[in-house]
Image (spheres, rainbow, N blue to C red):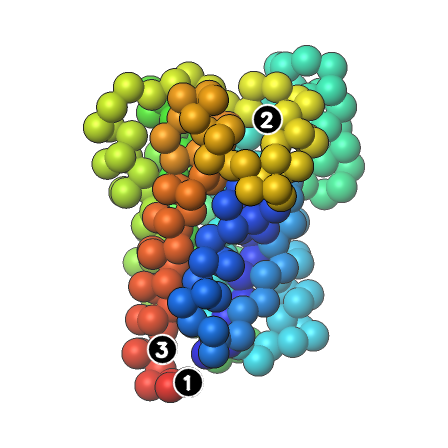
Amino acid sequence: MKVLFIGDSITRGTQSVDWIKMIEKDHPYWTMDNVAANGETLTKLSERLKTHLQQNSDYHAVVLQTITNDILLPTFKHRGFWFRQAYRYQIKSGNVPAAPPVFEALLRQTVDYVQKHYNIQLILTTLGCINENLLAETNAKLFSYNSIVKKVAKEMNCILADVSEDFQYHLNKGQTQDYCADDFANTAFLDLISCNIGMADKLSQKRKLHLTIDGVHLNSKGAQIFKEKIETAVLLTKEKSLLFI
């Protein structure tokens, strides 16, 4: 089984617990290419996916994870100096956030392109949360984007890995913190270093978070949800295509 993973920092795994490595541990005979990149919106991801498949299309499945920065990046405009600088840099780099109608059109175009040109099963993922406080404005927006992903997956014959359902279940069980990548130095540098030395769960405990280290990026529990949902979707791909490793 050969799988391509493309997405933002949630999939890249350098600033959180890496759920792809968790899948690799349980499925050592699968070949998994992770080409995710921190900070990317669907606009950039769509372009990179097309370019990558033009160069290498030997995959049974593509896992496409997005949404995060289409919601999170616009909030940077209303924060401190360094957040605003990061926003300008990302825009110049081609990471333009897409409002829901544009996001849906672009997601449909991306799915249509892959399905027309390649014999590859697409797996689309919802997103867990942007702030563990489910009443936060960012999560109201997230509901709209997740609904789009679900609708596109259903209407365009993609497999859906719905992590949002499990996140809501766990976050509704107890008291949650209103925390969403609050400090630029932590978001840009320090959290990445901490995660690389295995301190992700300690960051969560320090900030009294349940599934993430900062309201967005995953701790072990959040990564386990992603791992199980994506793993199930890939196994379904394998079953549908009658491919055996």
Tag 1 residue = 245
Q: Position of residue 28 (x, y in %)?
A: 47, 74
**Which sits in the foreground, 106 or 174?**
174
Residue appearing at x 33%, y 86% in the figure: 242
Q: Position of residue 112 (x, y in %)?
A: 49, 65
Is 196 drawn above or below residue 20 in the view shown? above
Q: Residue at x 47, y 40 (%)?
A: 218
Q: In screen coordinates, is 89 left or right of 129?
A: right
Q: Residue 238 has which mark?
A: 3
Type of the residue with mark 3? Lys
Which residue is denoted by mark 2 in the rendering? 74
Query: SS for tag 2?
Result: helix
Mark 3 and mark 1 in contact? Answer it, CB < 8 Å.
yes
- Report whether residue 102 is seen: no
Q: Nearer the viewer, mark 2 or mark 1?
A: 1
User: Are circles 3 and 2 on residues that touch, CB within 8 Å?
Assistant: no
Near mark 2 (Cα within 10 A), the count class, few <14, some 14-19 or many ≥20, is some
**Among the 4 quarters of the image, the one containing residue 130:** top left
- Badge 1 local density, few (<14 within 10 Å), some, or many (20+)? few
